[in-house]
Amino acid sequence: MLFALLYLVVRRVFGLAGGSRSDDLSKDVEILVLRHQLKVLRRQAGRPRLRRLDRVVLAAASRVLPRPAWSSFMLSPQTLLRWHRELVRRNWTYRRKGRGGRLPLDPAARELILRLARENRRWGCLRIRGELAKVGIRVSATTIRALLRRHGLGPAPRRSGPT
């Protein structure tokens, strides 16, 4: 967000600096771009690694310069356009709070489910769910079934005759 704001400020400065003569503005911006690139190249040896601030300055300058003058950049036009798209995307995407999905099962409830299942072998998932509901714990039968299977406690045996 900070770099998007900085990008907007730099772009406005480039836009206001020119006045009425756009040819002089283009030349001035091109000189500024070349000086900035020299500064980047002097800062390091080997392949230049641009910082985020460098990308902001170059992307803002590319919006002011006409397309034919983009040959003064040490980058391809596709790279400049990609950086500009990334700046716009970062400005309009916000971090999401937390993760989606179901909340994890409380450890105390988990232990209670396992204890009920071990002590009452003939109870199924629905019966355990009903007993937990009586004490105010809301858990689905599917969650209980998955927990029992994970701990090696299979389903309750089937009844053989009429009840």
Image (spheres, rainbow, N blue to C red):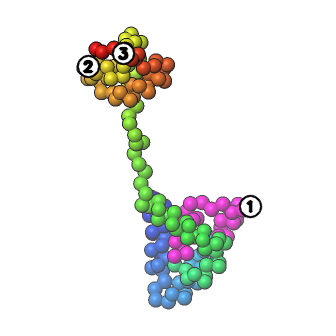
Instruction: Give residue 108's mark.
Output: none
| Residue 126 point in image, percent of width and height | 33, 23
| Main SS, magenta residues | helix
- In this rendering, is residue 2 above or below 60? above
Using the rendered view, name the quadrant where residue 77 is placed: bottom right
Gap in Å between the C-alphas at discs 2 and 1? 70 Å
Q: Which residues are magenta?
A: 37-63
Gap in Å between the C-alphas at discs 1 and 3? 79 Å
Label 2 neighbour load within 10 Å: few <14, some 14-19, many 20+: few
47 displayed left or right of 16 = right
Front-most of residues 99 and 126: 126
Front-most of residues 20 and 109: 109
Secondary element under disc 2, as helix, strand or loop, is: loop
Residue at image coords 60%, 71%: 78
Is mark 1 in CB contact (under 8 Å) with mark 3? Answer: no
**Whether residue 18 can be seen here:** yes
Image quarter (top left, top right, bottom left or bottom right) of the N terminus: bottom left
Residue at image coords 45%, 69%: 9
Judged from this view, the residue extending furthest toward the top is 119
- For the residue marked with disc 1, what is the amino acid? Ala
Judged from this view, the residue extending furthest toward the front is 161
Instruction: Give residue 135's mark.
Output: 2
Which of the two discs, 1 and 3, sits closer to the camera?
3
139 displayed left or right of 89 = left
Instruction: Give residue 45's mark.
Output: 1
- For the residue marked with disc 3, what is the amino acid? Arg
116 displayed left or right of 11 = left
Instruction: Give residue 159's mark.
Output: 3
